[in-house]
Structures are given as structure tokens and as C-alpha cells.
Image (cartoon, rainbow, N blue to C red):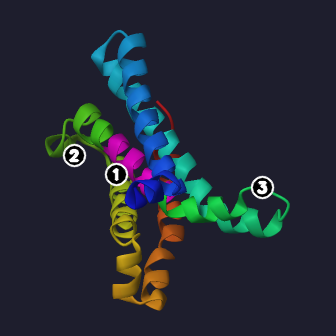
Amino acid sequence: MGYFSGILTNIRFYVFLFSAILAGSIYFYVKQTIPTEAAQTIKLTQTYALTAVTYLYFALLASPLTRFFTFLPFRGQYIHARRAIGVSALMFASFHMWNAFFGELGGFSGLQYLNLKYLTAVTLGAASLTILSLMAMTSTEWAVSKLSYKRWKFLHRFVYLAAILITIHVLMLGSH
């Protein structure tokens, strides 16, 4: 029971579980409420993007919020959950990318029809997704010990670059 009790008391498990349920709920809700496949793809792209950005900024705000608002309850759990929140941001960003790139754009063949503004925005999004992927791959205690805390922290500070690139990506593309 030791292993399962460890999972059941770990806030990261619940963040992942909630994120998986939310992703599925979004998908099924959109599929049930929007009639055309093209409109479904657009709505999924938008919703997953907004959810990814929300998760990312909740991860980024963990330290400032818990340091400034010392009276907040569950501050320790929030800080501990930050890695799972960040990995969940990657999950939703990946769903966003899949729907946007393969659903709306039509994959690599669709890139030739984009102007420079849209190509730049797609490149910024891809760079951000790469940064988030590297961070997710190194978000375990094992990775921290293998990289050393100093190198791990250096790598994870690239989240600020990803956040800036995502903001530019959003501003360049706008909403549908």
C-alpha cells in the first residue's frame, strides 16, 4: 500500500488527473456541441491554447504569489504542484499544436501558403513548444540529480523565454 498511498497523497498526481479529465471533457464537449468538423477544430485549437497559457501562467506565478501573499492557504502544495502544472501546460500546448498544425493548416504542406507573419508566429510557437518539452523531460527528481541543481535551474529559467515567445505568437496570430 506504500506506493499507492504515496500517489494518492501527491498533489502532482491530482493535477495530472484533473488535467487529463479536463482535456477529455473539452474534447467531448466541443465534439457534441459544435456541428461542423472545421468549426470543432478551430474551437479545440482555441480552447487548448487558452488552457495551455492559463496553466503556464499559473506555473509562472507560483513563486511570486506564495511569497507575496503569505496568508494564502495551501502555499506549499501549490509550489509542489508547479512541475505538474507546467507539464500540463505542455500537454494542452501539444493538443493546441496538433489541432492547429494538422487540423487547420493541413500539416507541413500547408506551410507554403503562409505569409511571413504567420510563418514567424508558427516558428515562435514551435520554439516555445520545444522549450516546454525540454522542461517537461527534465521535470523529475532524477533529472535534477543528473543535471545538478544549478544546470537544471538554468534550463528551467528558459520558461520565461517561452512565455515571451508565446505572448508574441498570440499577438501575431490573434483570435479567429
Sequence-wise, the earlier of marks 1 and 3 is 3
Q: Residue type at mark 2?
A: Leu
Which element type, helix, strand or loop, lies under badge 1? Answer: helix
> Label 1 neighbourhood size at 10 Å, few (<14), some (14-19), many (20+)?
many
Q: Residue type at mark 3?
A: Pro
Q: Is residue 91 magenta?
A: yes
Residue range corresponding to the magenta coloring: 85-97
From the top left corner, tell me how far across and down residue 112 is, in percent. 19, 45
Q: Which mark is residue 66?
A: none
> Label 2 neighbourhood size at 10 Å, few (<14), some (14-19), many (20+)?
some
Sequence-wise, the earlier of marks 1 and 2 is 2
Picture layout, residue 9 above or below residue 113: below
From the top left corner, tell me how far across and down residue 54 is, in percent. 57, 47
Is label 2 or label 3 in front? 3
Q: Is residue 34 visible?
A: no
Could you tell me how far apart the alpha carbons at marks 2 and 3 are, in whole angstroms? 47 Å
Q: Residue type at mark 1?
A: Val
Sequence-wise, the earlier of marks 2 and 3 is 3
Q: Which residue is mark 2?
A: 111
- Residue found 41% across the figure and 90% down from its top: 148
Q: Which residue is mark 1?
A: 122
Which element type, helix, strand or loop, lies under badge 2? Answer: helix
Q: Quadrant of residue 92?
A: top left
Picture layout, residue 27 above or below residue 109: above
Picture layout, residue 26 above or below residue 51: above
Q: Which residue is mark 3?
A: 73
